[in-house]
């Protein structure tokens, strides 16, 4: 073997060995950091909650509860100690609006972005408005933001008001005194969005109410439910389409 070849092989071996060593060191450092993070997290979890912190948490929850009831606003709370909140680090107050008059519901609904539900013109004779509910979102980027801000604050509980413009859920309910008729809008995940069109529920024939679902491929799905046997599937679809205002 020529001397030049031997030198090249030796050099390559050294480079490979050095690369392996650097890789091992990097992995060791990464593992050490991960272990330190676990130890820190465990220590934080084991850290006793002081009486002052518990008092602060109770006062904040009462304050936010009162604010939500008086203003109708929505608040997201980050809990530093999830064990004091049934194991969850996020909770919500407000964001749910209930109505017993259609005019009041419509006044709120028309201020929102996106699709809403309205009273269909082809509503069966004898049915009258019973109630409506509008709910704000509880999922989205804002939840991660509140969680990050809460951790950074170091507070035992962190509160942030959320100004939402599009409802996550809307429900309208009607009755003729005997049967009920309902319309709903709600968010769906990407998997459910793959199924488009009108679909019936798969409940046993003797289980009521009966549903017809409408998925138009967007991020929301709609349905109509009824306890009446006198309304055909064709009528249900026509009413559901008339009830959705995009």
Image: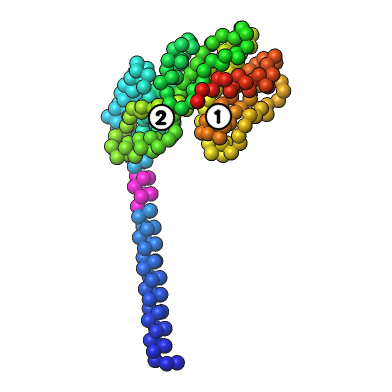
Do the numbered discs 1 and 2 sit on residues whose CB atoms are within 8 Å? Answer: no
**Dot 1 alpha-carbon crowd within 10 angstroms: few under 14, some 14 to 19, many 20 or more:** many
The foreground one among 202 and 86 is: 202
Q: Position of residue 12 (x, y in %)?
A: 40, 79
Res 95 label: none
Residue 92 position within the rendered picture, expressed as x and y whole percent measured from the top left: 40, 27
- Residue depicted at x 29% and y 27%: 56
Residue 140: percent from the left, percent from the top?
43, 35
What residue is disc 1 on?
Answer: 221
> Is 40 in the magenta?
yes
**Residue displayed at 33% across by 27% down:** 161
Is residue 142 shown in magenta?
no
Which x, y percent locates residue 128? 56, 9
Q: Is residue 142 above or below residue 61?
A: below
Q: Residue at x 53, y 11 (%)?
A: 130
The mark that comes first in sequence, 1 or 2, is 2
Tell me the CA gap for discs 1 and 2: 25 Å
- Residue displayed at 37% across by 19% down: 72
Q: Which residue is mark 2?
A: 91
How many other residues sit within 10 Å of disc 2, few (<14), some (14-19) or many (≥20)? some
Locate the N terminus by quadrant: bottom left
The residue segment tinted magenta is 35-43
Q: Is residue 208 left or right of residue 69?
A: right
Which of 204 and 227 lies nearest the eye of the viewer? 227
* Residue 214 as seen in the image, left or right of residue 162: right
SS for tag 1?
strand
* 219 to 239, vertically: above or below: below
């Amino acid at each position: 073997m020529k001397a030049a070849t031997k030198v090249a092989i030796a050099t390559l071996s050294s480079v490979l060995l050095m690369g392996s060593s650097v890789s091992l060191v990097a992995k060791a450092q990464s593992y050490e950091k991960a272990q330190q993070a676990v130890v820190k997290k465990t220590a934080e979890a084991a850290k006793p909650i002081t009486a002052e912190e518990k008092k602060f948490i109770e006062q904040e929850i009462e304050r936010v509860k009162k604010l939500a009831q008086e203003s109708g606003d929505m608040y997201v709370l980050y809990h530093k100690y999830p064990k004091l909140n049934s194991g969850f680090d996020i909770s919500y107050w407000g964001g749910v609006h209930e109505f017993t008059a259609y005019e009041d519901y419509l006044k709120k609904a028309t201020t929102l972005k996106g699709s809403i539900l309205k009273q269909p013109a082809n509503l069966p004779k004898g049915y009258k408005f019973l109630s409506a509910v509008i709910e704000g979102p509880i999922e989205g980027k804002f939840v991660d933001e509140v969680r990050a801000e809460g951790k950074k604050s170091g507070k035992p509980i962190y509160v942030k008001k959320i100004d939402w413009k599009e409802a996550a859920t809307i429900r309208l309910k009607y009755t003729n005194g005997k049967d009920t008729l309902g319309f709903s809008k709600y968010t769906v995940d990407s998997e459910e969005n793959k199924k488009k069109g009108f679909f019936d529920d798969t409940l046993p024939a003797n289980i009521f109410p009966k549903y017809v679902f409408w998925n138009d491929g967007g991020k929301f799905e709609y349905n109509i439910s009824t306890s009446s046997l006198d309304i055909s599937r064709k009528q249900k679809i026509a009413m559901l389409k008339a009830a959705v205002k995009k």
